[in-house]
Amino acid sequence: MASLTVQNLPGAPIPVQAGQTLLQALHAAGHDWMHACGARGRCTTCRLDVLGGAESLAPPTAAEQRYHERGRLALTARLTCQAQLPSGDVVGRVPEATKLPHVRYC
């Protein structure tokens, strides 16, 4: 099974099932994660800074490509509401700008 490790969140790697977005996997694991547009790919608040394993992620969606082209999403970032991880492992971090005030980060 694929897994997501978020370096600045406590806990074990998060299992990601086939067909599941990273956001769905994060929520299933009990993590609260910013997603102001309701997980519709209309903002960038759910982004994850990818540090390793980007090649394991499914290709960027049209929404992600649009934000990349407009300079609103770094090429090393993905929207957790859009990105899927068919296999492999990804390591990332919650960006400072989208940290939630009630969550304890490492």
Image (tube, rainbow, N blue to C red):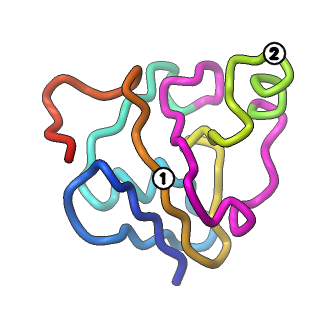
SS of the residue under disc 1: strand
* Quarter of image, res 75: top right
Q: What percent of the width, then of the height, locates residue 36? A: 45, 20
Viewed as shown, does residue 76 lie left or right of 8?
right
Say which amino acid is labelled 2.
Answer: Arg
SS of the residue under disc 2: loop
Residue at left 13%, top 28%? 102
Residue at left 49%, top 69%? 16
Viewed as shown, does residue 83 lie left or right of 29?
right
Label 1 vs label 2: CA separation? Answer: 22 Å
Say which amino acid is labelled 1.
Answer: Gly
Q: Is residue 67 above or below residue 7?
A: above
Q: Nearer the viewer, residue 47 or 36?
A: 47
Residue at left 81%, top 54%? 59
Mark 2 Cα-neighbour bin, 10 Å: few <14, some 14–19, many ≥20: few
Range shown magenta: 40-63
The label shown at residue 36 is none
The label shown at residue 70 is 2
Residue at left 48%, top 72%? 3
Q: What percent of the width, then of the height, locates residue 19? A: 63, 65
The label shown at residue 92 is 1
Q: How many marks?
A: 2
Q: Say which label, 1 or 2, has the lower sequence index.
A: 2
Q: Is residue 42 magenta?
A: yes
